Image (cartoon, rainbow, N blue to C red):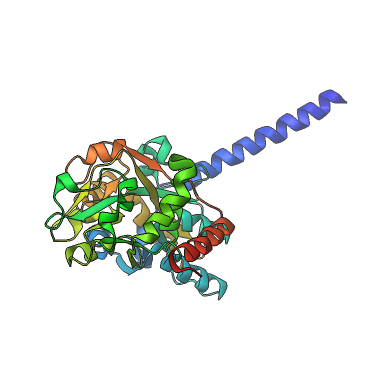
Amino acid sequence: MLLSRYVKYSATAMMTTILLALADIAAAQAPNIDAAKKEGGIVLYGTATPQAMDVINKGFEKKYGIRVEYWRASATGVADRALNEWRAGKPGFDVVEASRGVQLIMQKAGLFSRYAPPSANKFPARFREKDEISTPWRMLPIGIIYNNELVKAADAPKSLEELVNPKWKGKLAMPDPSSHTTTAQFLWNLKKYMGDKWPDFVKGLARQQPLLIESLTPVINALIKGESHVGIGLINTVTQFKGPVDYAPIDRYLADPSLFSLGAKAAHANAAKLYIEYACSPEGQEAFAKTGEFVLSPGIYPAIHDADKVTAKVVFMDNPTEEEFKTIMADFRVVFFGK
């Protein structure tokens, strides 16, 4: 009796292992190029700047003759549109590109199908998602950026803590953490490094009367215009926008990987898979890095001074749950707006 039960259990376990292995192989299969070409195009919702994403989109279109329709917004904006369309039963996207935090929220709602592009197997293991529903392909180190005509390099902040120095009052730009999820996540993660001082630091930022921006990327515009002297923003933007801007070296750069996800009801699923594979390929990664972006392929760096040192000091952020996001963003609304 025990032996028969063991045999049945072993057979079931073996069959489960085989099915999982087959699923892994299926998920990582090379895209069907002919089928993708017949579909003719894809719709992509993403967060990367249009000038950076054009390198991928135009390279893909030239190589395969498949048109890319790109709609860009902040991570919060991308998630809001995708989720609203999904709930209405009319998803308009084939591929979504956004930071991990909002991708996890969309995953939970069932928006995506599992797909692992073969080229991503070459990325370091620490960059991969275990469930392979979504594929990290770049990372977004957050740090201190500044106008180098208004602030000398020697006078730039040497740490995040220095941003609460009174000399930066009225001269700081940052995204609004009560409405921008990635900034809320960034501040929430600082408690791991600041401990009990974390709430005081956040309150200190609010006392600086910062210029609050929609999201991380546009912070650079406030610096270029001279509306602010320093900002909490993305390191990659200092080469993507023309102006007197630089980043200040600090001891660590909190970062969120940006992920590609295949729509569960993608109208152009084959073309979408091919697009994700292209963006993760050495060809796509090298081209994207030339725009100033930090990609995940080993040894490929953007044309930013000491980019390798930034990469070495990157720490991936933890992700709050959807409920935690709501709580911390409500808390930040009280801290920054008193309501």
- Residue reaching furthest to the right: 1
Which quadrant of the view contains residue 175?
bottom left
Which quadrant of the view contains residue 95?
bottom left
Which quadrant of the view contains residue 261?
bottom left
Residue 247 point in image, percent of width and height? 22, 49
Residue 85 point in image, percent of width and height? 50, 73
For the point 38% across and 66% down, which residue is it?
45
For the point 42% across and 35% down, which residue is it?
125
In the displayed structure, would residue 27 be above or below residue 35?
A: above
Residue 209 point in image, percent of width and height? 34, 64
Position of 47 compared to 148: left or right? right
For the point 43% across and 40% down, which residue is it?
193
Res. 304 in view: no
In the displayed structure, would residue 265 be above or below residue 17?
A: below
Residue 89 point in image, percent of width and height? 56, 74
Res. 130 in view: yes
- Residue reaching furthest to the top: 3
Position of 22 compared to 237: left or right? right
Q: Quadrant of the N terminus?
A: top right
For the point 21% across and 55% down, which residue is it?
146
